[in-house]
Image (tube, helix red, strand yellow):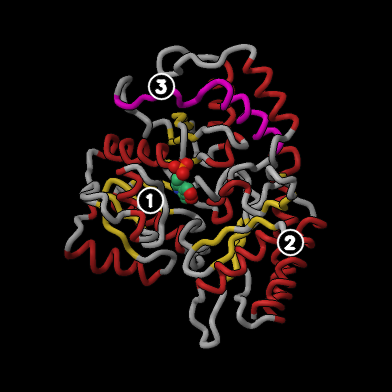
């Protein structure tokens, strides 16, 4: 729950764009931040190690879905994690090309923006981007057929592709869950041509889908994972998690002054503990309740699609009378929800996304569903 300057109280189904995984100001996270703040605020981890950074790195490395060891590089954001992942993939493979997906969102710095294929407004007027990036449609076997049978035989030498970067569930692009076997097939393509598989878990990771990393739902082993957002409950922190034999860059190849800040890492350690002590399970259970409620709503209101997603990464689309995506209707619903004390975000063409803090309970979900029902009765 959030309270504004006028004392209005809001139920937050956004978590500040999927960030405040443990809720707003969870006492254990606040306590960890306070304790660390009295101890050490900064000591660039590029040059000198300190305990919270090492502890969080070890914890993440132990949980990485890789066979063998993992290595961690801490950054300050999702975009910065993806920038580093591009550099790492190029550095390790000595190749220059990257394959990404239409609808993808990877961030707004030049490298990450070059991988992003979500909305033209995110690129317009910013000039040339990173060369060597090819976008293909997301989530379908037809798209991977196109990659292998068309692009790899005509335009894109597979043995020059450094990485395929993919969101396990596309976030900004509409909370799109890919076709069965899509992610497994990317892994196979990567293995066949010596390409690295980068999984962007900035939005889908850190327990949001009920597993620490969403890719685990598909039992696929990536080479590099990028994460940020929910990792430290609201403090700026990101991480690149890579197989040890891949994170081979030498000291000085990549570095950061603030990344892995001690206070952010302390918040990250507390966050991980809370995720593993019940919040990931809660995400699974509450996600089921939310989807069940939305299924009932879509039965009642045909202009609402059936829900999709996993855990607490859920979306529904709004359609017009002829069955086309209705962004205008979606935006009216978001605005009406705001006025009724419910914070919602859009994504994709006309979707409402639900990405609440993972502490949400069934009563709060019911409140959200009731508010949305009232609005639908009014606007449709
Ligand atoms: C999947 C994904 N990757 C990367 C980013 C960029 O993260 P940041 O805004 O922290 O740079 C986002 C942000 O929405 C995201 O959803």
Q: Give me the C-alpha separation between circle 1 and circle 3.
A: 26 Å
Which segment did they paint magenta?
253-274
21 left or right, relative to 219: right
Quarter of the figure with the C terminus = bottom right
Q: Is residue 359 visible?
A: no
Q: Is the CB of mark 2 within 8 Å of ligand 1? A: no
Element type at marker 2? helix
Determine the image quadrant of residue 121: bottom left
| Residue, disc 3 | 257
Dot 1: within a 10 Å radius of its alpha carbon, few (fewer than 14), some, or many (20 or more) residues? Answer: many
Q: Is residue 374 above or below residue 183?
A: below
Q: Nearer the viewer, mark 2 or mark 1?
A: 2
**Residue extending farthest right:** 363
Q: Residue furthest left?
A: 154
Residue 313 belongs to the span the image colors magenta: no
Q: Are marks 2 and 1 in contact (CB under 8 Å)?
A: no
Q: What is the number of the mark on residue 165? A: 1
For numbered disc 1, what is the local secondary structure? strand
Classify residue 157 as left or right of residue 135: left
Which residue is disc 2 drawn over? 368
Which tag, 2 or 3, sits closer to the chain's start? 3
**265 lies left or right of 221:** right
**How far across and down, in percent of the image, does residue 213 sit?**
56, 46
């Amino acid at each position: 729950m959030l309270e504004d300057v006028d004392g209005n109280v809001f139920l937050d189904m956004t978590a500040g764009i999927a960030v405040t995984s443990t809720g707003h100001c969870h006492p254990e996270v606040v306590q960890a931040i306070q304790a660390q703040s009295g101890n050490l605020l900064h000591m660039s981890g590029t040059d000198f190690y300190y305990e919270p950074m090492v502890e969080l790195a070890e914890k993440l490395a132990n949980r990485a879905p890789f066979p063998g060891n993992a290595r961690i590089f801490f950054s300050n954001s999702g975009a910065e994690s993806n920038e580093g992942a591009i550099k790492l993939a190029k550095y390790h493979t000595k190749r220059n090309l990257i394959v990404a997906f239409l609808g993808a969102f990877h961030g707004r710095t030049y490298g990450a923006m070059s991988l992003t294929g979500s909305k033209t407004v995110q690129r317009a007027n910013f000039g040339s981007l990173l060369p060597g990036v090819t976008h293909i449609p997301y989530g379908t076997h037809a798209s991977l057929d196109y990659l292998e049978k068309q692009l790899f035989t005509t335009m894109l030498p597979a043995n020059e592709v450094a990485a395929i970067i993919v969101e396990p569930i596309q976030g900004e692009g509409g909370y799109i869950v890919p076709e069965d076997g899509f992610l497994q097939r990317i892994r196979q393509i990567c293995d066949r041509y010596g390409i690295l598989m980068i999984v962007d878990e900035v939005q889908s990771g850190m327990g949001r889908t009920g597993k620490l990393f969403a890719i685990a739902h598909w039992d696929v082993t990536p080479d590099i994972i990028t994460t940020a957002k929910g990792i430290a409950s609201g403090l700026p922190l990101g991480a690149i998690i890579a197989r040890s034999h891949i994170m081979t860059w030498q000291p000085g190849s990549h570095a950061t002054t603030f990344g892995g800040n001690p206070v952010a890492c302390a918040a990250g350690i507390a966050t991980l503990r809370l995720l593993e002590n019940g919040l990931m399970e809660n995400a699974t259970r509450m996600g089921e309740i939310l989807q069940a409620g939305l299924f009932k709503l879509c039965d009642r209101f045909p202009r609402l699609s059936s829900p999709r997603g996993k855990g607490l990464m859920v979306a529904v689309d709004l359609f017009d009378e002829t069955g086309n995506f209705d962004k205008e209707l979606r935006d009216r619903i978001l605005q009406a929800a705001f006025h009724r004390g419910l914070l919602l975000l859009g994504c994709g063409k006309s979707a409402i996304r639900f990405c609440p803090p993972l502490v949400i309970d069934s009563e709060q979900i019911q409140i959200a569903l009731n508010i949305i029902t009232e609005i639908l009765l009014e606007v449709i």
